[in-house]
Image: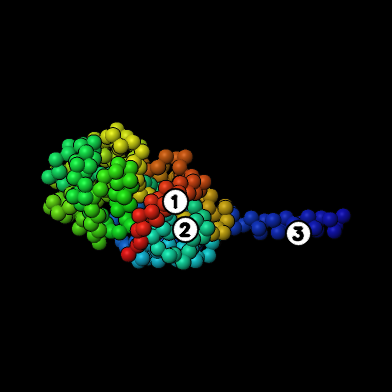
Amino acid sequence: MRILISAVAVCAIVASVGSAPAQTYPTRPITLIVPYPPGGSTDPAGRIMAERMRVSLGQPVVVENVAGANGGIGTGRVARATGDGYTVGLGLWNTHVANAALYALPYDVVNDFEPVSLLVAYPFVIVANKAIVANDLKELIAWLKANPGRASQGSAGVGSGGHLSGVLLQKMTGVRFQHVPYRGSAPAVQDLVAGQVDMMIDVPVNLLSQVRAGSIKAYAVAAKNRLSLAPDIPTVDEAGLPGFYASGWAALYVPKGTPKHIIAKLDAAVVVALADPAVRSRLTDLSCEIVPREQQTPEALAALQKAEIEKWWPIIKAANIKGE
């Protein structure tokens, strides 16, 4: 009997030791790697989330900007990190979808990561300079068809979301226009306002101030729903180009092999953060669209990434686009 009791006691001790990590994580600061420089829409959104998640997790979430290679350097660092929950990566449409078709990466964007949660979306907006005669999206497409190869589309660079959205627009409508890549959205928008390029497809944060100022025309948002900050801009479905959906997004990923209880705790912290009215207000001010609660799960993020890869990789490869 004593032997039996001793054996049960040992098992209880082992079980309690095994469950300790689930109960105590995190016990030290967590690093959130943002794979782009400070500034823009990506870095502030990551910092807002890190600040609020600290409250739920009981440990600091320290943002570290690891820029380079269109997000590839920071994302690669996450892929190589230990899967213990103390290195988390801010993953984007660029880093976890497009880059894998544009570059030869030293990691696999699907198999080297575990999805945690989708945070926000950045639906693209179709805009043009004021000199374009079209007053709505149908008229713009008609004008492009009547002037094949004449119009120019500015973008943040080769392989950017704006560039690839332009490729998709041409594929869906049969129009043709020239692509003019810039080193970032800011100089492209500047030339759009000046009339040096005819049109752009870009994220709201880069365009809405110029739209409100009347410096450029907005035709449609490439999503199923209108923008929170610009509800007067119709969706592509409403404007006459149904199904032309193109959106950037930001999410959290951890290295492959990270235990499920850690992923669940991080996801729970995201859910609490995105339900906070102050966080929602700050993200909305950055032109971020907060995703519904049902999309804030690891499973939903995995499904989104899979669908985006199936959609965009063939477009990139068919157009033979290579990252620069």
Disc 1 crowd rating (10 Å Cα; few below 14, some 14-19, many 20+) is some
Provide the residue designation for mark 3.
10
SS at mark 1?
Answer: helix
Residue 313 image offset from top left, x and y in percent: 42, 53
Is 85 left or right of 135, judged from the image as shown? Answer: right
Residue 261 image offset from top left, x and y in percent: 57, 52
* Circle nearer the N terminus (2, 1): 2
Could you tell me the amino acid type at mark 1? Ile
Marks 3 and 1 sit apart, C-alpha to C-alpha, by 49 Å
* Looking at the image, residue 199 lies above or below residue 142: below
Provide the residue designation for mark 1.
309
Could you tell me the amino acid type at mark 2? Val
- x 42%, y 39%: residue: 292
> Foreground residue, 202 or 20?
202
The label nearer to you, 3 versus 2, is: 2
- x 40%, y 66%: residue: 73
The label nearer to you, 3 versus 1, is: 1
Could you tell me the amino acid type at mark 3? Val
Marks 3 and 2 sit apart, C-alpha to C-alpha, by 42 Å
- x 16%, y 47%: residue: 129
**Residue 117 visible:** no
* Circle nearer the N terminus (3, 2): 3
Provide the residue designation for mark 2.
109
Residue 1 found in image quarter: bottom right
